[in-house]
Amino acid sequence: MSKPTMIKKISAADIEAGLLALPGWMHEDDKLYREFGFADFSRAFGFMAAAAIQAQAMNHHPEWFNVYATVKVWLTTHDAGGITQRDLDLAAVMNALFKPE
Amino acid sequence: MSKPTMIKKISAADIEAGLLALPGWMHEDDKLYREFGFADFSRAFGFMAAAAIQAQAMNHHPEWFNVYATVKVWLTTHDAGGITQRDLDLAAVMNALFKPE
Amino acid sequence: MSKPTMIKKISAADIEAGLLALPGWMHEDDKLYREFGFADFSRAFGFMAAAAIQAQAMNHHPEWFNVYATVKVWLTTHDAGGITQRDLDLAAVMNALFKPE
Amino acid sequence: MSKPTMIKKISAADIEAGLLALPGWMHEDDKLYREFGFADFSRAFGFMAAAAIQAQAMNHHPEWFNVYATVKVWLTTHDAGGITQRDLDLAAVMNALFKPE
């Protein structure tokens, strides 16, 4: 569970390259951003529970907002002052968990 | 959130008829039983979170067991001393939430 | 689970009166707002899971934001165009669930 | 997230010593066992959500059963064929999360 001691911001070009494999995610205000839509609140929160479990195990936590069936997520690495590989990794985990109806 | 005052056990024939629309569920020891399998623990628990939210809103709660990627569920209505329509309804809700990989 | 057909905005005076029993909540931008702080992410999310279960059973859902150990909540009733008794009720439920370390 | 390659069963004496610091837990059928009781289902499940997040991060998962406000937990380390330090650690995490009403 120890953090890597050196985690570095990645370049805008590397972010854009990473986003090619991350449908739905955008690079916005120096964060990765995606909005997920579900059939109802229970499914939205079930997704959040699964993502919370994986996020903690990655020792990397999302900024996220929920109302009813919508979940908005922003990813950034505060320790690095911007987007890092960890954000791309967590975005990929969330996409893998997302099962639209 | 008030409970219906009269909830009655249903007949074995009605249970069997109900189970025709509930793949994976069995009638065992006067309960409905199903085992759900997932790709990993996070997905198993995400399913449980979604089901928990719907179960509480139905004012009907499962007996359930989890270890890693497996969730076993038993449904019965204690107030009625056996299986009722509520159990069939909660089984249907769980099947609708279940998205095998 | 049917919605009351008539749910009405309450007056600013009634909101202020209600807030007297709701430590931590504020009236801001025609919503009720509170920020909850926890010891860590797991406790913040555990609180959200409990609140999600109760919110769905009340058929009333929060707008909420989480990052790590912080949960920010905004309550309003979209159908009524402002704050209603339901918002005061959900705020009370959340306060009852909140166990600071 | 890699598992320690060597995780060993601990002796009955070490288990008993460990249990001294773990109120509520028992040594039963070569597992650690505890039953947790809550005020209601939402609180029981909120506890499970927090514990699930910490368990995954420890790469160690409980066997647990829930019905309404009761959560029963059995801890063992399958890879080691019995109780290990990891079980004592997860038991301590769960006790720390448990806030009886």
Image (cartoon, coloured by chain):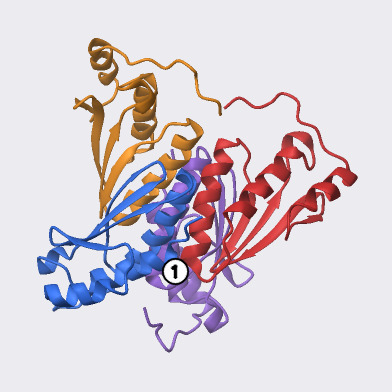
Chain colours: A blue, B red, C orange, D purple
Q: Is residue A94 above or below residue B86?
A: below
Query: Where's residue C82, x and y in %?
Result: 30, 22
Quarter of the figure with the C terminus of chain D: top left
**In the rendered image, the vertical position of residue B24 relative to residue C25, given as above or below:** below
Report the residue at 88% width, 41% height from top: B11
Please give the name of the residue rendered at 34% of the width and 29% of the height, measured from the top-left corner. Answer: C91
Disc 1 crowd rating (10 Å Cα; few below 14, some 14-19, many 20+) is many
Residue plotted at (26% across, 28% down): C32
Return the chain for callout 1.
D
From where the camera sits, is residue A7 visible? no
Q: Which residue type does callout 1 highlight?
A: Leu
Q: Quadrant of residue C50?
A: top left
Residue B39 lies left or right of residue C22; in this view the side is right
Residue wearing tag 1: D88
Q: Is residue D36 left or right of residue D85?
A: right
Task: Please give the count of numbered marks on the rendered protein.
Answer: 1
Residue B61 makes an appearance in the image: yes
Give the camera-side residue of D100 and C57.
C57
Asked whether, in this view, residue D90 is left or right of residue A5, the answer is right
Q: Position of residue A81 (x, y in %)?
A: 9, 65
Helix, strand or loop at mark 1: helix
Can you give x and y, in whole percent of width and height, for residue A91 in the image? Answer: 31, 67
Residue at the image point whose x is 66% and y is 55% from the top? B73
Q: Check the image and report above or below for C65 versus A81.
A: above
